[in-house]
Image (cartoon, rainbow, N blue to C red):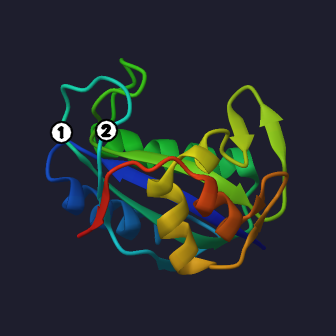
Amino acid sequence: METVYIGLGSNLAEPGQQLRSALSAMEQIPSTELLGYSSFYRSAPIGPGDQPDYINAVAALKTALSPLALLEQLQSIELSHGRERSIRWGARTLDLDILLFGQSQIDEPRLQVPHPRMAERNFVLLPLSELAPAMELPGLGTLPALLQGCPDNRLEKV
């Protein structure tokens, strides 16, 4: 069993409810246990500026699934929530990203872990720090050091 951290984000169709529903759906993933999740945070969008703010959180899971099998489960949850992959960094009903998968470093066409841009995103690092405050991120450094060097994106707990 591996401990896995999942980034959740939504800025369409009642984002807070989208995240709560996604957390419930993650509890149904086979061979997987939801250990907990962070507070919800409101953040400014990255990408096209004509979109609403995001609601973000991080969830901790324990899973016996392989990284790609878990990715398929998460993408199925996204689809069931109306996710469309049309515009990069565009508005979305639900985004579920595997941030960390144990201490694994994965570089495959469909999956990169640690998530390649997580060190630049306070809306990922701050919620993650609620769950694992002193964590060492594989190949990236400690969470406190990453938070200190992270660009300041407007972020507020909701």
The x and y percentages for residue 64 are: 74, 67
Structural distance between the alpha carbons of marks 1 and 2: 7 Å
Check whether the beta carbons of the residues at disc 1 and disc 2 lie within 8 A of each other: yes
92 relative to 138 in the view: left or right: left
> Considering only vertical position in the picture, is 117 above or below 41?
above
Q: Nearer the viewer, residue 146 or 64?
A: 146
Q: Residue at x 43, y 21 (%)?
A: 88
Q: Which residue is mark 1?
A: 52
Q: Quadrant of the N terminus?
A: bottom right
Q: Locate residue 158: give its quadrant.
A: bottom left
Q: Nearer the viewer, residue 34 or 145?
A: 145
Q: Which residue is mark 2?
A: 45
**Quick one: SS at disc 2?**
loop
Mark 2 residue crowding within 10 angstroms, few (<14) / some (14–19) / many (20+):
some
Q: Locate residue 56: give its quadrant.
A: bottom left
The amino acid at mark 1 is Pro
Q: Nearer the viewer, residue 16 or 34?
A: 16
> Considering only vertical position in the picture, is 5 above or below 95?
below
